[in-house]
Image: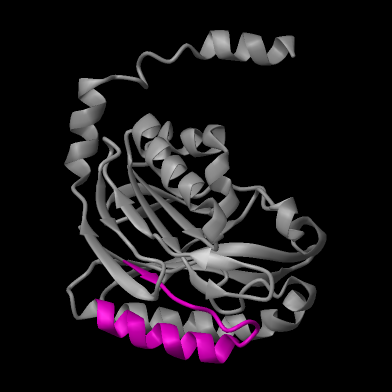
Amino acid sequence: MKIACIQSDVILGKSRANFENMKSKIIEAVKENVEVIVLPELWTTGYCLKEIGLHTADQEEIISELQLIAKSNNVTLICGSFPIAQENGVTNTLIVISKTGEIVKTYDKIHLFQLMNEHHYLQAGETDGLFEIYGLTAAGFVCYDLRFPEWIGAHSQKGAKVLFFVAEWPIQRMNHWETLLKARAIENQCYVVACNRVGKDLANTFGGGSMIIDPWGEVISKGSPNEEIIFGEIDPKKVDEIRGTIPIFEDRREGIYKKLQKSN
């Protein structure tokens, strides 16, 4: 399976301009015969959190256009995330669109990043990130979720073989980004595909460094700090081979883990 990650710059609060920039890059990636394209977190708006509710109306039309792009180009889109209006507020929602143009998954980011005041402007999700693409179980997560291994691990234990991360990860913590992504690949014996934005907003510089990592933690492809598209190929059979070599899922001691949790 050939995958592309598009790490783009974002103009704060300018959904249509950001979409037009991204659309041209998606068409560029399609020319390389990819099956899956991954986009960053909140790439239509950036972190304009104080005004985020004003931008939710723009997202429906953009998502509909992405559905048409996916169908017309026979490509699955891990669309990154969008600010979506819900009954109880706005969520930071990852959307997956199949190659037939159908929305096959929406996942609302469950861990809100207090350091960037997400908890003041966004509502946390409550559901899992599992979905199916090309007959393969996968899972999607948004940025700060990366720091919660028990949440990621719950998905690999449910059969996920590819973990997709979409992010706006700041440049000063890029060492954490790379280390944690490799760790999630190794400990879950999964492929990890992570797409991060680049550029600046009013308070942050974002580091790019999108990565495709195999289940041994070896880097297949890695991006620079600039706008670009990275490509990589994954083989789901390798997940089964590695899980057969070191059977960590068979060797888990769930009873003891639960006993420790209860004692706290």
Colour pattern of the rendering: one colour
Quadrant in which the C terminus is drawn: top right
For the point 63% across and 67% down, which residue is it?
A: 204
Location of residue 73 with respect to 252 vertically, above or below: below
Magenta span includes 47: no
> Can residue 99 be seen in this snapshot?
no
Q: From this viewpoint, is residue 29 visible?
A: yes
Can you tell which quarter of the image residue 55 is in? bottom right
Please say if 5 is above or below 72: above
Q: Position of residue 165 (x, y in %)?
A: 46, 54
Residue furthest front as drawn = 172
| Membership of 13 in magenta stretch | yes
Q: Quick check: 1 left or right of 47? A: left
User: Residue 12: horizontal and vertical position, in percent?
Assistant: 63, 82
Q: Residue at x 27, y 51 (%)?
A: 135
* 113 on left or right of 41: right
Identify the residue at image location x=77%, y=78%.
Answer: 51
Q: Which SS type dominates the magenta stretch?
A: helix
**Residue segment shown in magenta:** 5-29
Residue 194: x and y, percent? Answer: 40, 56
